[in-house]
Image: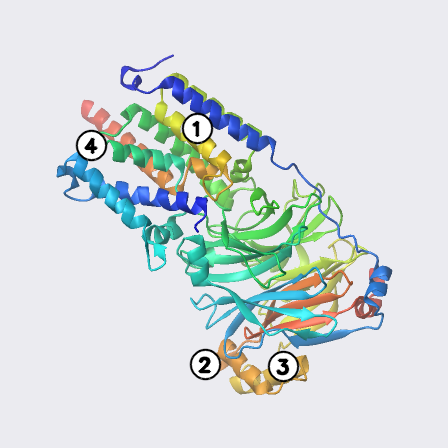
Amino acid sequence: MPNFTDLTGLAGVAVAAAAAVSLLPGTAKLARSRLAVLQAAVFLLMVVPFGGMPAAAYLRGMTGDLSITTLVLLSCAMLSPRKGCAADRQRQVLLSLVAPAALVFYPMALGAEAYDPYRLGYGTVQFVAVLLLLALAAWLRGYAMIVLCIALAALGWASGWYESGNLWDYLIDPFVAIYALAAIMNTFIRTLLKAGRGG
Amino acid sequence: MNVSAGDQKYPHRLLLALVVVAFGAAFYKVAHRPGPASFQVRAYHASGAEAQRSGNTRPEFRTDFVSTQQNISTHAASLVELGDGRIRAFWFAGSREGAPDVVIRTAVFDPAKNTWSPERSIVNRIDTEHALLRYVKKIGNPVAQLAPDGKLWLYYVTVSLGGWAGSSITAVASTDDGTTWGKPRRLITSPFINISTLIKGTPFMYGDGTMGLPVYHEFIGKFGELLRIGGNGNIIAKQRLSYGKSTLQPVVLITGPEHALVLMRRSGNSPKRVISTMTDDAGQHWSASRPTSLANPDAAISGVVLPDGKMLVVLNNIEDGRAALSLVVSADGGATWKTVYQLEDQRGQPTDPLHFGEISAELARATDPGIADPSAYAKSAQRNKCVAQHCDYEFSYPYLIRTHSGDFDLVYTWNRSFIKHVRFNRAWLDQRLENYAELH
C-alpha cells in the first residue's frame, strides 16, 4: 500500500505531464472538452502501474515532488489552456517574486555561502511570519494566485502533504524557478525591444 | 483594497479564510517543533567500570573478515551495537561500485563467541524503487543507529539521476535488531530536486532522544551538514558544518553536552589535510573550518571519544593513495595527533599483479589464519585493484565504534574486495598509549 505522500508526489508529476499535453502540436485546434479528455487520459496513464511502477514514478525519480507554486501554475494552464486562469499581471508578479528568490536561494542552499536559507524551511517562526505578511499583502492587492500559492504551500507543509518537512519545497522548485527566470527575461527583452521601436 | 475588475471573480473572503487556516496550522507546527538540544554524552565513560563489565583486562587485538563473497566489489562498511551487545555490520557489494546489482549486505558479530553470522542481503535497488515509488539507478553507503525506543534505523544512499553527486538518502527501520526491515522512505534534504546528500559518518544522539546524522553534499559544492531527525524519522533541523568545494564526510566527535569537534575529509588539492570545525553550543553554531595536522588523501575518516576525553581516529594519514591506514590519538582536543598503531601499510611494495597477489594472500592469511584459501582473497583483490600491470593497495573507509563493554570495533574496506574487522579492548589501547606518555 503506497504512502499518502507517495500518492501526492506521483499525482503532482502526473498533473505536470497532463498539462504538458497542451504544448503538443495540434492540440491548439482541439475543442476544450476533447483536450480535457486527452489530459485526463495522460494523467491516468501516468499513475497506473505498469510492471510494478507507474510511469510517473520514473519521472518523479528525476524531478522529485513538484512545488505547490508549480502545481498552481500548471493547474491554471490546464483549466484555461488558451488564456490562463489568472490575469497576466498576477502571473507576472508571482514570477517576479519567484525569480529573484530563486537566484538568491539556490546558490546559497547549494553551498556557495556559509549560511543555508533552506534550514529556515524546517519551521522557523520568522520565515512563516514573513510568508504570512506576503500572503496578506497579496490578498490586499487582489493577487489571488499568489495568495493561493503561499497559503496552499503553508497548509501542505503543516499537514505533511509531501515527504518533505521543509516549507521551501512546497513554495518553489527548480522548474518553476527556471520558468520564472526565463519569463522575466523574456518580458525584459520585449520591453527593451518595444522601447527601441518606440524611440 | 485595490481589486481590479478582472480579479473580482475570486472569492476574497474564502481566500482570507484559507490564509487564516493555513497559517494557523503552520504556526501550530512551528510551536510544536522540538527546540535545540544538547548532545548526548555516553554514560559509560569510566574505563575501570568498562573493564569490570567486560571482565577482561588482558590486552586483546584480533582481526578477521566480515564479508565472505569472492570476486565482487565490496565497500563502505559501518557498524552498530545492538541492544544485546552484538554488533551488526552493513556494507554494499556488487559487480562494481554503482552497478545496478549492488545490494546492502549485513552480518552480526557475537562478541561472546568472536564469530560473525553468515552475511545476507537486506536492501536492493529494485525493492527500494518500488517502495519509494521512484526510479532508483543505484544504491550505496549504509550507516545505522539504534534509537532509544529500540528501533534500528538504517540510512543508505540512493541515486536516481547522474553519479554519486545525484544522491539522496533513504531510511528503513527494523524493530527486531535487523532481522526484518520495514518499508524504505526517502529523506528530503536538499531543495534542488533533492540532490545531492550522502552519508558516511557515524550517527549520534541528542539528549532529547532525537538523532544527529552527519551528511555531506557533493554536487556544485562539497561541504558537510548535520541533520537532526525526530523519533518518527522526520527531519526536524539541518545545520551547515562547512561550505565551499572541499569538505566531505563529516565525523562528529562529541566531547561534552555542548562541545564537539567535527573532522572532515578534504576533497581537492592543497592542503591535503583533514579539515575540522567545532561547536561550543551543541551545534547551533560552528567555527570556521580549518586544516588539522592530520594528512588526508581525499579519503574517509572515522573516530570515537574516549572516557577521558582523548580522541581516537582511524584514517589514511598520508597525502596520496590509500595504502596505509593508521590509528591516531589526540589528548588535546584535536590540536595534535600521534599514531598509536599502524593498521595497514603497503607503501613502497611492488605493484605488479603477481607480487600484489602474493602480498594480498599473505595479508589475508594474517588477517584470519583460519582462511582456507588465501589465494582466492588475492584474486578478488586483483580483480578490483589491478588495471593492466599496475595494482593499488587500498585500505579505506574506516568505521570505528566503542561498545558499551568498552571494547572497540573497526571495519574498513580491504582492497575493495572484503570488509575487514579489527577488534581491540581498552587494555590493548592503554598499552599502546603508554608508548606516548607525553600525551597524558
Task: Please give left or right for residue B410 compared with residue A4 in the image.
Answer: right
Q: Which residue is mark 2?
A: B388
Q: Which residue is mark 3?
A: B364
Q: Which residue is mark 4?
A: A82
Task: Please give left or right for residue A120 compared with residue B166 in the image.
Answer: right
Q: Which residue is mark 1?
A: A151
* Residue B99 vertical placement versus B237 (above, below): below
Query: On the rendered image, what quadrant is the N terminus of chain B found in?
Result: top left
Q: Secondary structure at mark 2?
A: loop
| C-alpha span from label 1 to label 3 | 62 Å
The image's colour scheme reads: rainbow
| C-alpha span from label 2 to label 3 | 23 Å
Quadrant of the rendered image containing residue B238: top right
**Crowd tier of the residue under label 4, counting other residues whose Cα lies within 10 Å: few below 14, some 14–19, many 20 or above:** few
Q: Is residue A23 visible?
A: no
Q: Give the residue drawn at x 75%, y 62%.
A: B329
Whole-percent x and y of residue B157? 51, 58
